[in-house]
Image (cartoon, helix red, strand yellow):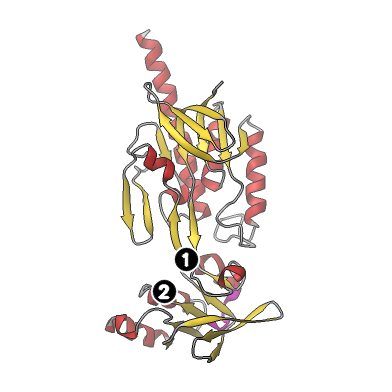
Amino acid sequence: MTERYEVVVVGGGTAGLSAALVLGRARRSVLVIDTGKPRNAPAAHMQGYLSRDGMSPMEFLAVGREEIARYGVELVRDRAVDVAKDADGEFDVTLEGGRTVHGRRLVVATGLADELPKVPGVAERFGRDVLHCPYCHGWEVRDQAFGVLATTPMGVHQALMVSQWSKDVTLFLHTVAEDELADEDLRRLAAAGVDVVPGEVAGLVVDDDRLTGIRLADGTTHERSVLFVAPRAIPRTGLLERLGAELQETPFGTYAVVDPTGLTSVPGVWAAGNAIGFGEQVVNAASGGYRAGATINGELLFTDLDAAVRA
């Protein structure tokens, strides 16, 4: 038997929990489907969220799960593997564990996965002294010796950005040829005092569980204590694609096209968090989930009132 809810939320990260909290407080029946593997799990802390600055991401999510439970929101540890829209414009979601759940409305907050550069040691130290976002970690590593690993010419932009937090920055071109850099980029790097080192990076130098250097393929080593990398974003858009939602290409992946409330091109389907963009930090995701939840509640309310009027 298919279990029925007013709203099914796929993804129990910040955006999904925020939407569920608003809807639970609005006395809606809500199910959150979550695998328990958030994108920011490798990070020891999150930053830039007023009143929660420095909090552990896992602690933040644990508190969020406790909050939604107070309002009767259900959470299941499972993966949504398929979704179909029925004749009434509502949704049947199939879970990996075999269940099928029905929602009048759907929130997709499935986020994205970070594909890290395939340099030995990077994945093991990601979130510690291998970082990607200066707004997330820059203050904590300020004034240290930074390295930036370029995998595309966009590495120049990252090197220039992190120079706000340290004046000792080296850009390792890695797989980027020197002639791929624009003259303007070279002038900006010089103005920022960023050193540019050509040659492929072969690995990291780690001593006493601490990054101490970057080793090139030619055997030379450069002392660095922090390495910034640019993961390739892989948005989890499978469910949206199955529903025929409009997607748009960006320099950072393909994401759902949404209106200001998070409504996708599919009536009844909202998206929030990293499902709509690479730059949706925790605080943005919470806001997006809130907007989606409040909009869905109002839409359901007036849909039911109008149906009662017609009856």
* In this view, 251 is above or below 225: above
Q: Nearer the viewer, residue 296 or 116?
A: 116
User: Mark 1 near mark 2, Cβ–Cβ under 8 Å?
Assistant: no
Whole-percent x, y for residue 306 in the image:
37, 16
Q: Mark 2 points at which residue?
A: 151
Whole-percent x, y for residue 128 in the image:
62, 70
Q: At 28% across and 81% down in the image, what residue appears? A: 182
Dominant secondary structure, magenta = loop
Q: At 38% across and 84% down in the image, what residue appears? A: 189
Tag 2 or tag 1, which sits nearer the N-term? 2
Quarter holding residue 185: bottom left
* 267 lies left or right of 71: left
Q: At 51% across and 74% down in the image, what residue appears? A: 228
Q: Which of 252 and 139 is in front in this view?
A: 252
Quadrant for the N terminus in the image? top right
> Does dot 2 land on a helix, a strand or a loop?
loop
* 32 lies left or right of 155: right
* In this view, 27 is above or below 223: above
Q: Residue furthest right?
A: 208
Whole-percent x, y for residue 206 in the image:
64, 81
Quick check: is 144 in the magenta stretch?
yes
Q: At 37% across and 79% down in the image, what residue appears? A: 176
Q: Name the residue under label 1.
A: 231
Q: Give the range drawn in magenta.
A: 141-146
Tell me the distance, in whole angstroms, between the alpha carbons under discs 1 and 2: 9 Å
Q: Which of 21 and 244 is in front in this view?
A: 244
Q: Residue furthest top?
A: 311
Residue 21 in sight in this render:
no
Amino acid type of the residue tagged 1 in the rendering: Pro
> Does dot 1 land on a helix, a strand or a loop?
loop
